Structures are given as structure tokens and as C-alpha cells.
């Protein structure tokens, strides 16, 4: 293994030991790679294309000069493309991705699947058999990951995103909201306990820009705009599935707000009167404080002098100290045994 490889995720290391498998393709679509990792060292003639539902990885790929497409849905495949799918944590998202990809793949093409055992890749065999009557072959098993191969043997039904949407309803004291979510989006079909504590306790301004940072299906931003239609509400997320869901939630409720991708503050311009968030502290099944530390570290610069940041978090997380390092006044405005809502200003 080369020295860079020792820092790669286990899935990248498994791909690295099997590169010759992919080099036989003339064109390869890599779907939802969690990092550039091994692809940085690609030297074969195979034309590489990337599809990513994660704006962070998509931006890194673009920066490294790769062709990468960021969206919730794959609408077509590059000509003659084989596909490598990185298995997601959510089983339902895996089902959706498989239906989506198979619907576009030509007969005779290869579909490879790689994933970590702890993220459920071993259920690929059962899902492919149940949903598509396909048997897969195991190519490699190492570093608690498995790499599988499927040869596409027929045409599959047209993919329709509408059949994957979940509709639920959030009832609050002052309003009811229809929430639309795609698989893989945070708290699919139910209101998160933390968000449920934030919503009745969010202090909104009379006017100005309000940001829903890490919007998921768009509940916080939608409720803010519903409560005060004077506000200019913006919703950002790193996940294409979340952004698509948030747009649909807003449309379903007749609410207008701006929805766009950003990796933490990467694509956000100007300052806000208020920033609201139930910040992420996971990527997949792993703890990941990158987004929340970015949120807190930059928030003061992104908020106008008399504005504020309001976040909800599990009470055991160390956010209060982090907020106190950046803001003069930090108050707990609501709490339960599990969650706290912090308001930070100054
Ligand atoms: C805890 S969820 C909250 C979702 C929604 N606001 C709610 O309350 O139901 C956090 C959200 O942050 C998003 N996220 C994760 N990393 C991010 C990043 N670097 N930049 C922006 N959003 C991110 C996740 O995709 C997820 O939708």
C-alpha cells in the first residue's frame, strides 16, 4: 500500500486492491464516493465520471479536476458506462439508488457495489434479489468491507422519484406543516426531538435574512417563513436529497424561500439577522463535528451586530463551551433532559 492509502477509508482501500477490475471499463460512473481517495491516483484509460449526492465531496472532486455531477437523481448515464455504487447507511436509500441506476443501465454493463459491513452492505444480496430478481457475485472481502458485482441482464423499469417521497405532517401550536422527505434525509417521516424543542422556542426577527443551516427536509426554515412571511429565509444543506426534500416541503406548503447547496458556509454570501440550526454531528454512522465547528467558528462573522444564532443540540454535546468561545452572551432558552436550545449573540 502506498503512504497516502493508509489514510484512506476502508472502502477506498478495498477499491485500491481491485483497481484492475475497473480498468477494463471504457467509462465508469462512480456514485457517492465518500472521498476522492484512490481516484486521485487513477491512471487507466477508462473515462471517470462522478455522481455525488454530497456537496462536500462533489466540490472536492471538481476542485481536483474531475467531472462530477451533484443532484438527488441520476437522469441519464454517460454512454457505455459501467457503475460503481458506494453503499449508503440507509437501506431505503440503497433501494432507491439501485432502482435509479438499474433503470438507466444497458444490458451487459457491470454494476459494482462496495461498502462497509457496519453500514449494511451485506444486505445488498437480499435487496437485489427481492427488488430486482438479480443475483450478485462477491469479488472481495477485506477491511470489514465487501465488493460485489452484478451483470445487468435486461432492461429495468423507468425510475420515478415520486414513488420514493415520504409525506408526513408536523402539527405545532400555531401551524401545521406537510413535510416531504426522500430516503436518506434526516429524521425521515418524523419530527426529530431536538427540532421539536427548537421550533416553539425560536426567536424570529421582524424582518431580515434568516438562515436554516443544515435544513434537512426544510422544517425549520419553512416554519420560520410561515410564522413571519416578511423574512427572507434561506435554507442550505450539503445533501442533494435534503435540498430536493426541502424544496418539495416548501412547495407543498405554498412557502417561498431560497434553497441551495453549501458545505457549511462555503457557498453562503453576506450576513444574516438570525441563523437557526439543528446542526449535524454525524456523517453516515460516524461522529463528525466538522460542520458544527465550522458553523460556530464562523457564525459571528456571518451575523449582523444585533443578530443571533440559535441552535439545538443533545445536552451532552460540548456546544455551550464552543459558543462561549465565540460569543459574548450565550443563554440556554429551553431544555429537556436530552436537548438544549442555545441562543448566542454579541
Ligand atoms: C441534524 S440534521 C437537521 C435537519 C433539519 N434541520 C431538521 O431539523 O430536521 C443536520 C443536517 O445538516 C446537514 N449537513 C451535514 N453536514 C453539513 C455541512 N457540512 N454543511 C451543511 N449541511 C450539512 C445534513 O445533511 C442534515 O440534513
Image (cartoon, grey):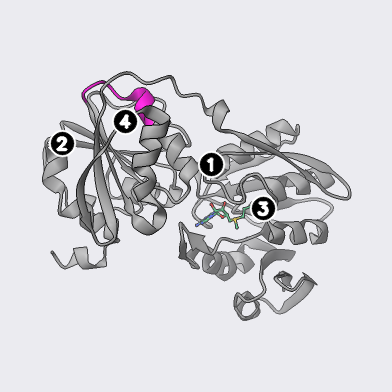
Q: Is mark 4 within 8 Å of ligand 1?
A: no
Q: Nearer the viewer, mark 2 or mark 1?
A: 1
Residue found 74% across the figure and 78% down from its top: 329
Hey, which quadrant is residue 78 in on the image? top left
Question: Circle 2 sits in a helix, a strand or a loop, which is it?
Answer: loop
Residue 51 visible (yes or no): no
Q: Mark 2 highlights which residue?
A: 46
Sequence-wise, the earlier of marks 3 and 4 is 4
Q: Mark 4 highlights which residue?
A: 134
- Give residue 8's mark: none
The reply to whether the C-beta atoms of the residues labelled 1 and 4 are less than 8 Å apart is: no
Q: Which of marks 1 and 4 is in front?
A: 4
The reply, left or right, for residue 208 in relation to residue 74 is: right
Rendered location of residue 271, percent (x, y): 64, 57
Distance in Å between CA atoms under marks 2 and 3: 42 Å
Q: Mark 3 highlights which residue?
A: 211
Amino acid at each position: 500500500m502506498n503512504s497516502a492509502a493508509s489514510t484512506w477509508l476502508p472502502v477506498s482501500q478495498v477499491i485500491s486492491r481491485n483497481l484492475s477490475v475497473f480498468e477494463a471499463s471504457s467509462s465508469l460512473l462512480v456514485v457517492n464516493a465518500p472521498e476522492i481517495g484512490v481516484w486521485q491516483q487513477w491512471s487507466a484509460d477508462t473515462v471517470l465520471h462522478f455522481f455525488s449526492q454530497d456537496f462536500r465531496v462533489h466540490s472536492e472532486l471538481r476542485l481536483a479536476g474531475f467531472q462530477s455531477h451533484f443532484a438527488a437523481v441520476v437522469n441519464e448515464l454517460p454512454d457505455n458506462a459501467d457503475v460503481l455504487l458506494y453503499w449508503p447507511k440507509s437501506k431505503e436509500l440503497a433501494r432507491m439508488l439501485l432502482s435509479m441506476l438499474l433503470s438507466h443501465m444497458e444490458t451487459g454493463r457491470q454494476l459494482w457495489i462496495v461498502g462497509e459491513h457496519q453500514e449494511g452492505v451485506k444486505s445488498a444480496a437480499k435487496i437485489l434479489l427481492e427488488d430486482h430478481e438479480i443475483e450478485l457475485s462477491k469479488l472481495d472481502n477485506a477491511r470489514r468491507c465487501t465488493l460485489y458485482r452484478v451483470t445487468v441482464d435486461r432492461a429495468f423499469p423507468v425510475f420515478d422519484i415520486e414513488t420514493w417521497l415520504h409525506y408526513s405532517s408536523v402539527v405545532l401550536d400555531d401551524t401545521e406543516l406537510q413535510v416531504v422527505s426522500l430516503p436518506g434525509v434526516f429524521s425521515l417521516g418524523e419530527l426529530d426531538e431536538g427540532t421539536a424543542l427548537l421550533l416553539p422556542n425560536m426567536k424570529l426577527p421582524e424582518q431580515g435574512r434568516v438562515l436554516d443551516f443544515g435544513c434537512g427536509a426544510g422544517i425549520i426554515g419553512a416554519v420560520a417563513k410561515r410564522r413571519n412571511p416578511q423574512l427572507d429565509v434561506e435554507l442550505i444543506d450539503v445533501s442533494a436529497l435534503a435540498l430536493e426534500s426541502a424544496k418539495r416541503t416548501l412547495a407543498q406548503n405554498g412557502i417561498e424561500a431560497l434553497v441551495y447547496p453549501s458545505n457549511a458556509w462555503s457557498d453562503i454570501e453576506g450576513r444574516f439577522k438570525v441563523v437557526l440550526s439543528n446542526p449535524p454531528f454525524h456523517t453516515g454512522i460516524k461522529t463528525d463535528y466538522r460542520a458544527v465547528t465550522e458553523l460556530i467558528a464562523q457564525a459571528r462573522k456571518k451575523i449582523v451586530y444585533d443578530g443571533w444564532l440559535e441552535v439545538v443540540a443533545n445536552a451532552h454535546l460540548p456546544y455551550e463551551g464552543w459558543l462561549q468561545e465565540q460569543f459574548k452572551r450565550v443563554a440556554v432558552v429551553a431544555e429537556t433532559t436530552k436537548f438544549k436550545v442555545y441562543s448566542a449573540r454579541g
